[in-house]
Amino acid sequence: MPKSGVNLAGRTLAVMRKDLKAEFRSRYALNAVIMFALVTLTVISFALGILRLSPEMLAALFWIVVFFASMSGLAQTFIREEESGTSLVLKLSADGTSVFFGKALFNLLLLFMLAILIVPLFIVLLKAQIMSWPIFLAAVIPGLIGLAGATTIIAAIVAQASVKGTLFTVISFPVLLPLLVGVIEITKVALTGGIWGEVTAPLQLVAAYDVVMVTLSVMLFDFVWRQ
Amino acid sequence: MLRLKIEKLTKQFGARRVFTDIAFELTGGESIALVGPNGSGKTTLIMTVLGLLPPTRGKTEYFEDDKKLDFEQYRKKVALVAPYLNLYDNLTARENLRFLSEVNGCKIDDADIDRALETVGLAGRGDDFAGAYSSGMKQRLKYALAIVRDPEILFIDEPTSNLDEAGKKIVFDLIKNYRNDAILVIATNETEEYTLAEKRCQLGG
């Protein structure tokens, strides 16, 4: 006899574990995200030759690579459910909140794996010097949280559409723009060796973005996903 | 005791009316067969009653001891077995049952899974990927999912779809011996199947 009593955390982790298992068995999103980042950084490195980019350019480039690499893989969490026809069984079995958090956590893990790969490449291939690691991490960690939160709900919307690929990037760009502006500003300060006082305003913007985006997503997700 | 009440339920896609003014009421222990030819709206009616499609008119309500349940409350009490319900091909049968029960709030152990798989004739196949199953085995796995969750309302669309004779016997036994306080809704056009239910709702003329 089944025993009831799996709480929200348990249900969320179950969704994340299922997506991780499915991903490591197919490696569809992971390969797409990593290959995009690898190819882009290598091409830019060859194109630059011995030239060195300014911290402003490097900061923008880092987040452009993260943004487009994530666009190539993060939508898969919901598109795969729709295309394999498993969204019905998931809608009947799971509540929207645990599905949102489970899939957002999965996307966040994917983004952290991407960051672990591209930060060393960014330093080696583009000769970037990170002068303040704490400030750099203050850009990367909330930046990836905001990116995972926003792309998860956008992926849920896009998965219902017939033209999925382009639509995901087109909708994501304006939604993510405030976040990207903030994290690029913080990254620039980390690369120039600035102080915490210089990043107060962009940090507030990024923190506010993360809170608003995650709260709105949780509130709207059930409606978006079940329609 | 659970009660399912359907009042003047109508579903229309554009100008095409799929069904009109469907009404019935079922309490725990009762069963109904939704009968009609292909395209008469049996599946659409099930989707509407499950709350996955909005009705054009009318309403579906679930009650427990006269207290009205919202979607999240009754979702945990229902299960669906249907040919169009796809399970996860890249998970094993065991992983499918565990994951879909866990997200539904039910903790199950290996013994529960083994018992359910054995009931549907899939003993020893729990560690195979669902994607490697034949369509008949997948249908049996959906019954295993319903059994392991022990729902109070069971919706079955085309009960014996894709099943061989042994599979059909398992399903008939399962329906006949299903928990006697449950509500059973069966959509079919097979005489042998709709006679398993006490009530009948004719669709499509």
Image (spheres, coloured by chain):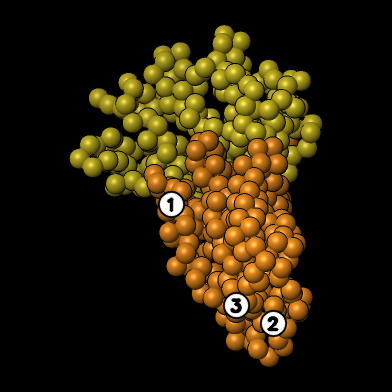
Chain colours: A orange, B yellow
- In this rendering, does residue B159 appear at all? yes
Rendered location of residue B86, percent (x, y): 54, 32
- Spatial CA distance of label 2 from label 1 is 35 Å
In the image, what residue type sits under mark 2? Thr
Residue A56 — which label?
3
Look at mark 1 in the image and give the residue it sits on: A166
Mark 2 vs 1, N-terminal side: 1
Q: Residues within 10 Å of mark 1 (few under 14, many from 20)?
A: few
Q: Residue at x 56, y 61 (%)?
A: A67
Q: Residue furthest front?
A: A50
In the image, what residue type sits under mark 1? Thr
Rendered position, B145 above or below B192 = below
Residue A192 — which label?
2
Instruction: In this rendered view, identify the residue nearer to me: A39 or A76.
Output: A39
Rendered location of residue B94, percent (x, y): 72, 32
**In the figure, is residue A32 to the left or right of A178?**
right
Q: Nearer the viewer, mark 2 or mark 1?
A: 2
- Spatial CA distance of label 1 from label 3 is 28 Å
Rendered location of residue B115, percent (x, y): 74, 26
